[in-house]
Image: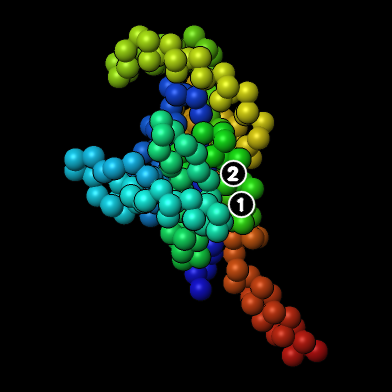
Amino acid sequence: MSDRRGLLIILSSPSGAGKSTLARKLRDWDTSLEFSVSATTRAPRVGEEDGKDYFFTAEDDFRAMVNDGDMLEHARVFNNYYGSPKGPVQKAIDSGRDVLFDVDWQGAQQISNSTLKQHVLSIFILPPSIKELRRRLETRGQDAPDTIALRMEKSWDEISHWDGYDYVLVNDDLTETEAKLKSIITAERLRLSQQPKLVDHVRALQSEFEDTK
């Protein structure tokens, strides 16, 4: 048994708030952090590898996993299913490895209500302002104007669920937000529920105490 159980770390935010950048910085800080590999019923694209990019799954098999409780969260997007298989995550956290999830509020809610909820650490990233959120989307140069407009429309739906998370950070300074994220994860790794060997240690202390009487 590992000295500690891993955390199931959820990062959510509206597009442009800095979630992806912060996730990369967390993995640079701790290379043992794993990204959760999603399952999907869509066909592989050129260069994608099964088990690395996605677990490519037949629709009947995907539905069966959902019915059997083997998906931590799932959703249907553009006629295909996407979801997070429970098995690999369970194996990781039992081995003391943290798993990072980049999901929206609906996925976060499903995971937080799953059988692994005691290991969940959910964090929502807020932008300093809507004006700044738009500026970030425009200056990163990844999306056409109509796509930016759609992302802005969706942003408030995401933000409105901010209070369903364990921690909420306003990303007005990337360096400060990164430092706060690291502090949160460091502290949560010491949560009592994440330290299975503490029970044996306390029993040993009790035995030693009794022997000194």
Q: Quadrant of residue 119?
A: bottom right
Secondary structure beneath label 2: helix
**On screen, 103 above or below 92?**
above
In the rendered structure, which amino acid carries the disc numbered 2? Gln
Q: Report the colour scheme.
A: rainbow
Q: Badge 1: few (under 14), some or many (20 or more) residues near its Cα, within 10 Å?
A: some
Q: CA distance from mark 1 to mark 2?
A: 6 Å
**x then y, percent, for residue 190:** 59, 57
In the rendered structure, which amino acid carries the disc numbered 1? Ser
**x then y, percent, for residue 201:** 64, 75
* Residue 6 visible to an observer of this rendering: no
Q: Which mark is residue 110?
A: 2
Identify the residue at image location x=19%, y=40%.
46
Task: Count every numbered label the image shows and give the total.
Answer: 2
Instruction: Name the residue that disc number 1 marks.
Output: 114
Q: Badge 2: few (under 14), some or many (20 or more) residues near its Cα, within 10 Å?
A: some
* Residue 19 visible to an observer of this rendering: yes
Pointer 1 and pointer 2: residues touching (CB < 8 Å)? Answer: yes
Q: Quadrant of residue 197?
A: bottom right
**On screen, 134 above or below 19?**
above
Q: Is residue 24 left or right of residue 204?
A: left
Identify the residue at image location x=59%, y=60%.
194
Name the image quarter holding the C terminus: bottom right
